[in-house]
Amino acid sequence: MKTPSATGTLAAWSGYRINLVGLVSFCVVLFWALMALLAPYITPHSVGAMIDMDYFGPMRPGLWLGSDYLGRDMLSRVIFGARYTVGISLAAVSIACFTGVVLGMTSAVLGGTVDMVVSRLLDAMNSIPSKLFGLMVVAAVGSSIPVLILTMSVIYIPGSYRFSRALAVNIDTMDFIMVARIRGERLPYLIGSEILPNIIGPVLADLGLRFVFIVLLLSGLSFLGLGVQPPYADWGALVRENIGGLPFAAPAVIVPSLAIASLTISVNLLIDNLPQKIRDRSAP
Amino acid sequence: MKTRVPSLILGRLFIALITLTIVSFAVFFATTLLPGDTATILLGQSATPEAIAGLRTAMHLDEPALLRFLYWIVGLFQGDLGTSYANHVPVATLIGGRLLNTLKLAGLTTLVSVPLALTLGITAAMWRRTLYDRIVTIATIGIISVPEFVIATSAVLVFAVYLKWLPALSFTYDVNSFSGLLRAYAMPVITLTFGVSAQMIRMTRAAVIETLNTPYVEMALLKGASRPRLVLRHALPNALSPIANAVALSLSYLVGGVIIVETIFNYPGIAKLMVDAVSTRDLPLIQSCAMIFCVGYLLLITTADIVAILSNPRLR
C-alpha cells in the first residue's frame, strides 16, 4: 500500500479514489495500531527499568527517545503508552457508538413518546461538559481502567445518539421501510437489516471523530492525574509525569505530546479525506 | 404577520430550565454514589457509633436520596452551598474570589479571541482555496485535534523556553503593574485563545462560505462586485446569525479549557479549586463547582440558540 503502484491497484480494486493526505494519515493510524498491538514484543527495554544514570536524558543511540524523570527508556514507555491510549479509547468508543446508534435507530423507528423522552434525557446529559463529567465520576468512584472506559462511553453516547437518529429518521421515511413494516417485521429486523446498512458509512466516520474526542478526554484526565494511574501510563500520564522536563525542552515531555497529536490529527485528516462514497452515503 | 420570536425564546428557556433540573440531579447523584459513609469519612475511623448516628441525623443522611436532593437544591437557592469537608470553611467563601479570577481569565480570552477569530474566519472564506485559506484551515484542524495541555506545553516551549519572553509554569501574583499583569495572564490567555479561536474560525468560515454559495451572491458576482464587497456587503449580513451562534458555542469550549489551563499554570481559579477538591474528595465543593460550570455552559449554549433565533430575519 505504500508504493504508488500498490495504491493504483488498491484504487482499482476498491473502486475508490484515494488521495495522498488520506493515505499518509491512514499509515500513521496503522502504525500506532501496530505499536499498540505488538508493544510487548518490540519494546527495547522493560517499561519500569531505570537504565539511564541521568534523568531527562537527551536522544542518543540506545535511548532513541531519551529517558524520563526516573531515567527510564522513553521509547519503550511511549510504545506501551500507545496500548493504553489506543486500547482504552477504542473500547470506550465502541461501547458509546454501539449504544448510541442502537438507541438512535430505535428512537427513529418507534417515534412518539419514547423518542421524545430519550432525546430530552440524552440532550440534558449532553449539556454537562465532558471533562467535568469525567472529574465528577472520578471523584465519586475512583479511576480504574474499566471505570474510565465506561465513563467515557457514557459521556459520548448522547452525541452518537443524536447523529445516528438524525440519519435514521431520514431513512425511516423511505418506502422500503414502509413495506417492511407492512410485512410485519419487528424492531430488531427493522433497525439491523433495513436501517443500519443504509447509514453505516457516516456512522463509521462519526465513530472515528468520536474516537478522537475520547483520546483527547482521556489524555486530558490523565494529564490532570485523574485518568490512567501508575504503574500504567498512557500518553497523557507520560506528559504529566515528565512535565518537570519542560523548562529544558526534554524529549520526555515533547515525544508523548507529539504522539497524541500525530494520532488525533491523522484520524481527523483520514476522515476528512475518506472517499466521498463512504463518507456521504445517505448523509442528510 | 405575527411574530414568533417571543414564544420561540420562551420555549428555549423552558428547555434550558428542564435541562438544568436534570443536570443538577445528575451532579447530585454522581457525587453521592461514593462508596463509604460520609459521616464515617468526616469523623474518622475512631468515632463512636453514637457520634456517627448523631451526625447522620444532623446531615439528613438517613433520609431518602430524593429528599436530600431537595434539601440541597433549596440550600443552593438560599445561597447555602454547604461546608467543605477538607477544611470546614463554607464553600461559598472558598468559591467567591476564585470565581472572579476565572471570569477574568475567560473575559480576557473572549476579548482577544473573538476579533481575531472573526477576522481570520471571514478573510479565509473571502480568499477561499488560496494558500492563505489552506494554511488557516490546516492550522485550525491541527489545533482542534490536539488536547489543551499539548497547546499549553507548546506555548511554554515557544514563549518561555526558546524565546524567554514569559515565565514558564509559575503564576506570579504581582498584578499591580501592567507588565506584571500581562506576564501573569499571557500564557493562560494564549493557550485558551488558540483553542477557542480554532473552533470559531472553522464555524465562521463555514457559515460565510455557505452564504457565498447562494444564488443572490452569484448574482452580485455577475454584476461585477469585487470580492471583499461580495463578502462584506452581500454575504456577511446573512451569515451573522450562524456566526453569532458559532461565537457562543466556541466560548463553551472555555469550560473544558480552563480546567486544564488553570491546573497547568497554577492559576487560582475555580477549576483549579475543583481539581484539587477531586483529589481530596471534597464532595460539597465538587458539587458546587460542577453546578457553576454546568450553569455557565448551559447559559452559553442557550445564548447561542437565542441569538440564532433573534438574528434570523425570517422569524421576525
Image (cartoon, coloured by chain):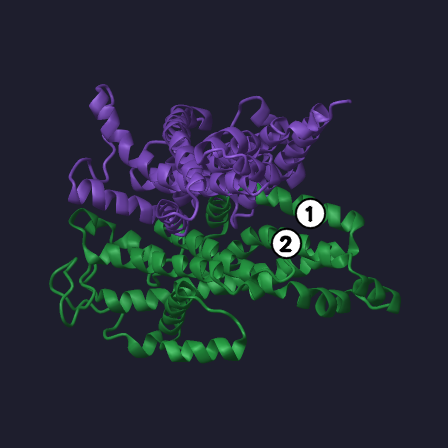
Give the letter of the green chain.
A
**Which residue corresponds to mark 1?**
A119
- Residue with the most extreme left position: A53
Residue in the foreground of this view, choosing between B104 and B57? B104
Horizontally, is A145 left or right of A190 in the view? left
Which quadrant: the N terminus of chain B?
top right
Q: Position of residue A14 (x, y in %)?
A: 53, 76
| The chain coloured purple in the image | B
Quadrant, the C terminus of chain B: top right
Query: Where residue B33 appears, x then y in whole percent?
Result: 56, 47
Splitting the image into 4 quarters, where does residue A280 fall? Answer: bottom right
Q: Which residue is mark 2?
A: A161
Q: Quadrant of residue B59?
A: top right
Q: Residues within 10 Å of mark 1 (few under 14, many from 20)?
A: some
At numbered mark 1, what does the secondary structure look like: helix, strand or loop? Answer: helix
Asked if one can make out residue A144 in the rendered structure from this viewpoint, the answer is: no
Crowd band around label 2 with a 10 angstrom C-alpha radius: few (<14), some (14–19), many (20+): many
User: Looking at the picture, does residue B23 appear above or below residue A257?
Assistant: above
